[in-house]
Amino acid sequence: MNNKYILSLVAVFSGVLLSLMIMSNSYLASFTTPLTASWITHGIGTLFSLIIYILSLRKNQQNKKNNNKIKILWYLGGIPGAFTVLLAAITVNSPLSLSGSIILMITGQILFSVIVDAMGWFGVEKRKITLRDLFMCFLLISGSALLIIGR
């Protein structure tokens, strides 16, 4: 099987997990608060990350690989994740519901990634915005509007 297809399946599975995560966090937030739900979610995520980190250290010690030093700034990726969980818990429990929240989050991710590609931020190779990219953004925003307004 082609690597591109496997990666596409992994990305789809990641989207399913994202929807499940947001749904369960918002459900938890309906019993507590969005902030408490975010703390619980990130506490559990920290424990699993610690387990994976310890297992990877063991594997790296066996392989004796020399890893490049990681910039401390890269560890701050959890901050947008925490806000994502918090804000998703708020929007899913609003009239937007799960589907509206997910489509708007994906819209925001795609629009921001197009800008990042165009500007070359975060060490990404610069890429010009094409007419195809603009058309894709137009269709994405139109589809999002139809999904939310067409209820």
Image: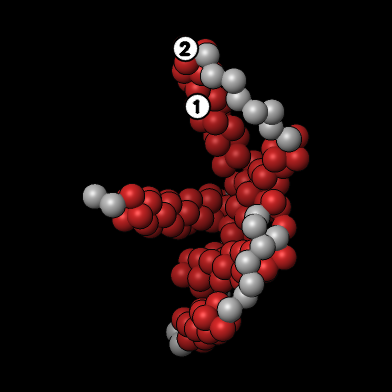
Q: Is residue 127 visible?
A: yes
Q: Which residue is mark 1?
A: 52
Type of amino acid under label 1: Ile
Is 117 left, or right, of 15 in this rendering? right
Out of 9 and 37, give the one closest to the viewer.
Answer: 9
Q: Nearer the viewer, residue 29 or 138?
A: 138
Q: Sequence order check: which comes first, mark 1 or mark 2? A: 1
Q: CA distance from mark 1 to mark 2?
A: 15 Å
Q: Is residue 11 above or below residue 92?
A: above
Residue at (70% x, 60% y) in the render: 120
Q: Residue furthest left?
A: 1
Closer to the camera, 115 or 55? 115
Reply above or below: 8 against 61. below
Q: Which mark is residue 95?
A: none
Give the percent coordinates (x, y) of residue 115. Answer: 67, 68
Amino acid at dot 2:
Gln
Q: Is residue 137 visible to the viewer in this orientation of the structure?
A: no
Which residue is drawn at the image coordinates 50% and 26% (left, top)?
52
- x, y percent for residue 50: 56, 25
- Quarter occupied by residue 5: bottom left
Asked if residue 83 lies left or right of residue 94, the reply is right
Q: Which of 84 and 75 lies nearest the eye of the viewer?
A: 75
Residue 118 sits in quarter: bottom right
Label 2 environment density (alpha carbons within 10 Å; few <14, some 14–19, many ≥20):
few
Q: Is label 2 in a helix, a strand or a loop?
A: helix
Residue at which label 2 appears: 62
Q: Secondary structure at mark 1?
A: helix
Residue 9, horizontal then vertical, whole percent:
33, 54
Question: Residue sitting at 60 percent across and 47 percent down?
Answer: 37
Q: In which quadrant will I find the C terminus?
A: bottom left
Residue 130: where, in percent of width, then height?
A: 58, 79
Residue located 71% across and 52% down the image? 122
